[in-house]
Image: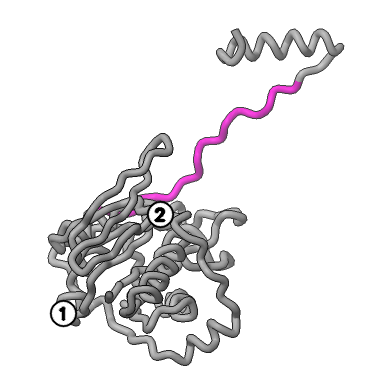
């Protein structure tokens, strides 16, 4: 089974204080570390596990600038056979434009595949729809929120999807197909620095995004970055204990927390 896995290099903003620059035109990421998108990490691991069991190849593909090669090296260190970088210095915010770029790349380069994996969403823009759009424009079966792959046959796969309320849905999809992998489907393997260095010796092919232009202009454009509105500060209670308890109960009743 030949599996294409799309990986993305994203800013690790969880512990960082982001600053908006150029009067809202951009976010300053110059001092922010980058990493592989969390959902893509699970996608690569699941693809490698399938190939280890069923045979085939895993090819990691990333769209981004030259620095995105680091997520390809990581994917190869995890077990991918090779990596393709579709190099573009322009930040593509429109998931539709990204999907059309992928479509044009696959068709022009005649990239063979049985299954395409994407993460459920990316940590930066969180649109969560590249997989679905890609399945639609390729005319292939698609499933989102994949939390388990129970069976793989020559012409179909049995997968489990995560639903609301702790429910799961078991689905049969014809192959080829597109799947968006949910976190928690597996435990991604540890990748050492030495493993990534060894992976750097594996050839990664670089393509130019300009060679696969989309027919339509991007439909989504970032107009302005803003900080969220500040919420009110904490209410400080003062006085004797019984007085503060009465004040606290009054606040809880006012907010509907206590009846």
Look at the numbered discs 2 and 1 and tell me whether their residues touch, using CB distance below 8 Å. no
Left or right: 173 with respect to 181? left
Question: Which disc, if any, is residue 63?
Answer: none
Q: Is residue 236 above or below residue 64?
A: above
Toward the viewer: 244 or 62?
62
Asked if the stretch drawn in magenta spans residue 221, the answer is yes
Asked if the stretch drawn in magenta spans residue 222, the answer is yes
Q: Which range of residues does the magenta coloring cover?
A: 220-236
Q: Is residue 228 above or below residue 42?
A: above
Q: Residue furthest right?
A: 240
Name the residue at 69% across, 11% down: 249
Q: Is residue 25 visible?
A: no
Name the residue at 35% across, 59% down: 149
Q: Position of residue 15 (x, y in %)?
A: 61, 55
Q: Is residue 79 visible?
A: yes
Which secondary structure lies at badge 2?
Answer: loop
For discs 2 and 1, the disc positioned in front in the rendered view: 2
Where the N terminus falls, by quadrant? Answer: bottom left
Q: Position of residue 80 (x, y in %)?
A: 40, 79
Q: Which residue is mark 1?
A: 108
Name the residue at 59% across, 15% down: 257
Q: Main secondary structure of the magenta part?
A: loop
Question: Which disc, if any, is residue 182?
Answer: 2
Name the residue at 40% across, 54% down: 182
- Where, by quadrant of the figure, is residue 89 drawn? bottom left
Q: Is residue 213 above or below residue 132?
A: below
């Amino acid at each position: 089974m030949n599996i294409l896995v799309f990986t993305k290099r994203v800013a690790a903003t969880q512990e960082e204080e982001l600053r908006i620059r150029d009067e809202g035109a951009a976010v300053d990421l110059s001092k922010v570390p980058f990493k592989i998108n969390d959902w893509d990490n699970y996608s690569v691991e699941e693809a490698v596990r399938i190939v280890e069991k069923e045979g085939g190849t895993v090819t990691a593909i990333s769209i981004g600038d030259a620095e995105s090669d680091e997520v390809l090296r990581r994917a190869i260190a995890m077990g991918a056979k090779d990596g393709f970088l579709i190099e573009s210095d322009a930040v593509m915010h429109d998931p539709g434009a990204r999907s059309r770029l992928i479509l044009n790349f696959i068709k022009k380069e005649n990239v063979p595949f049985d299954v395409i994996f994407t993460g459920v969403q990316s940590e930066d823009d969180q649109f969560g729809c590249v997989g679905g759009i890609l399945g639609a424009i390729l005319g292939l079966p698609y499933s989102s929120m994949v939390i388990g792959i129970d069976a793989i046959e020559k012409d179909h796969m049995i997968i489990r999807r995560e639903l609301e309320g702790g429910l799961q849905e078991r689905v049969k999809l014809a192959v080829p197909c597109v799947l968006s992998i949910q976190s928690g489907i597996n435990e991604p393997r540890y990748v050492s620095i030495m493993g990534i260095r060894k992976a750097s010796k594996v050839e990664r092919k670089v393509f130019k995004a300009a060679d696969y232009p989309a027919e339509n202009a991007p439909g989504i454009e970032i107009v302005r970055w803003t900080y969220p509105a500040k919420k009110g500060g904490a209410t400080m209670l003062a006085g004797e204990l019984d007085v503060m308890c009465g004040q606290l109960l009054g606040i809880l009743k006012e907010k509907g927390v206590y009846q």
